[in-house]
Amino acid sequence: PEPAPEHELVPTEETIAPVLPDGPSEHPSTSYVLHVNGADRPVSDAWIGESLLYVLRERLGLAGAKDGCSQGECGACNVQVDGRLVASCLVPAATTAGSEVRTVEGLAVDGEPSDVQRALAACGAVQCGFCIPGMAMTVHDLLEGNHAPSELETRQALCGNLCRCSGYRGVLDAVRDVVAAREATAEPVATAPDDAEPRIPHQAAPGEGGVQTHEGDVR
Ligand code: FES
Ligand code: FES
């Protein structure tokens, strides 16, 4: 066959951006406000199907949560939504408008890494570091619900966080160290000594009422 004339191979406006017939868009967009780490973060004209992970990283510049698998398997994207740990790659961002989102950027206290983050570093859990933001979120979430987890409970909490470097020993050690440090600095709870006399409020005898009698009172 004859080769196509050269002018037919030049891309036209139609071939680059075909005009879709009128009708509902296949990618409807929306605008909403996320509440992230205590601040309102508006999101404008975003495709309604964008994941929370994508919006945090690509629209809001919060790149702490990592995209390891995009399918809920690795835990690198973990954040909290209204206090619950979620894989942000599986959550449509628009559904979290009105919720409190907490990311790894929100763990710092007074600009310093949290005790969990410092312990992870001190215990050698941070190797390449890719899994650590999600790991830190999981550990914070664990310790919020269980102040003194056993090693088995810690392992169960971490089973959704994949780490290809550290072997997890450092993470387990970090959790143990944080629990010990928090216990050591916890305010002692005021309790009555065991041998203390029980304090029983004075009760007036039947018919006496609670009013003291005085000389001259008519009874
Ligand atoms: S990126 Fe979300 S679980 Fe892996
Ligand atoms: S430190 Fe590299 S994946 Fe966990």
Image (cartoon, rainbow, N blue to C red):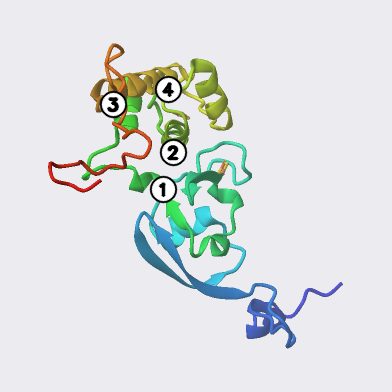
The image quadrant that residue 33 belongs to is bottom left
Residue under numbered circle 3: 189
Query: What type is the residue that disc 1 sits on?
Result: Thr
Mark nearer the N terminus (4 vs 2): 2
Mark nearer the N terminus (1 vs 4): 1
Q: Give the foreground label among 3 and 4.
A: 3
Kindly state the secondary structure of the residue where label 1 is placed.
loop
Kindly state the secondary structure of the residue where label 4 is placed.
loop
Q: CA distance from mark 3 to mark 4?
A: 17 Å
Kindly state the secondary structure of the residue where label 3 is placed.
loop
Q: Give the foreground label among 1 and 3.
A: 3
Query: Which residue appears at 65% of the width and 72% of the height?
Result: 27
Kindly tell me whether residue 97 is visible in this rendering: yes
Residue under numbered circle 4: 148
Mark nearer the N terminus (1 vs 3): 1
Residue 178 location (% of width, % of height)? 34, 24
Kindly state the secondary structure of the residue where label 2 is placed.
helix
**Which disc is residue 103 wearing?**
1
Q: CA distance from mark 4 to mark 2?
A: 17 Å
Mark nearer the N terminus (3 vs 2): 2
Q: Residues within 10 Å of mark 1 (few under 14, many from 20)?
A: many
Is 205 on the left-hand or right-hand side of 1?
A: left
**Label 4 CB sits under 8 Å from any ligand 2 atom:** no
Residue 175 location (% of width, % of height)? 40, 23
